[in-house]
Image: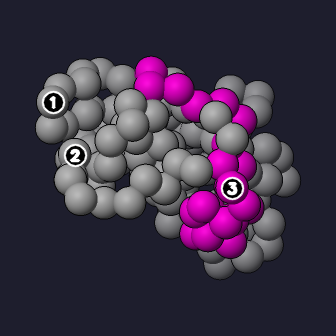
Amino acid sequence: MEHKKGWNPFMEENGIEIVSESAERTVLRVIPLKKHRNPYNMIHGGLLFTMIDCAAGITARADGNAYVTQNSYVNFLNNTDQEEEVLAETDVIRRGTTIVVVHVVVRTSDGKKLADAVVDMFRVTGMPDMRR
């Protein structure tokens, strides 16, 4: 699904790109820059969480409805100071009529797992369609 440029300015500001998306699985990517790093030169947890939240939201909204984050549980497992691609990948645990539960894993391109999360997305009505 193609999105118009600027459909998510927060993702654009952080250099996060959509690799693929569907109602069952979404993949996002970013190459962390200096601005994405903490004082220890590791990837800032806020960037990892942003990838988690955006990936879960894109997956939830792929069914044509509007969703907002209701709850999230994140384990930050590892980190890296390397300049390498980072991917966030989702799988739907359960898609109900009002809640979508999404599992998100963030890892480096060589498979090192950085974070593991479960995000509950709540369906809302009366919101504009941001997909196009």
Residue, disc 3: 4
**Height in image: 6 above or below 21?**
below
Characterize the local packing of mark 1: few (<14), some (14-19) or many (20 or more) Cα atoms within 10 angstroms. Answer: few
Judging depth in this view, the residue of 11 and 72 nearest the camera is: 11
Label 3 element class: loop
Q: Type of residue at label 2? A: Arg
Residue situated furthest right in the rendering: 83
Q: Nearer the viewer, mark 2 or mark 3?
A: 3
Residue, disc 1: 97
Q: Magenta stretch?
A: 3-24
Judging depth in this view, the residue of 53 and 32 nearest the camera is: 53
* Residue drawn at the location 82% of the way across and 46% of the way down: 84
Label 2 element class: strand
Q: Is residue 79 magenta?
A: no
Chosen colour scheme: one colour
Residue 98 in view in this figure: yes
* Residue drawn at the location 58% of the way across and 69% of the way down: 10
Residue, disc 2: 123
Query: Is the C-beta separation of discs 2 and 3 under 8 Å?
Result: no
- The x and y percentages for residue 102 are 34, 32
Q: Left or right of 107: which side holds 19?
A: right
- The x and y percentages for residue 55 are 50, 43
Q: Nearer the viewer, mark 1 or mark 3?
A: 3
Q: Left or right of 53: which side holds 97?
A: left
Which comes before the other along the chain, label 2 or label 3?
A: 3
Q: Residues under labels 2 and 1: Cα distance? A: 8 Å
Q: Type of residue at label 1? A: Thr
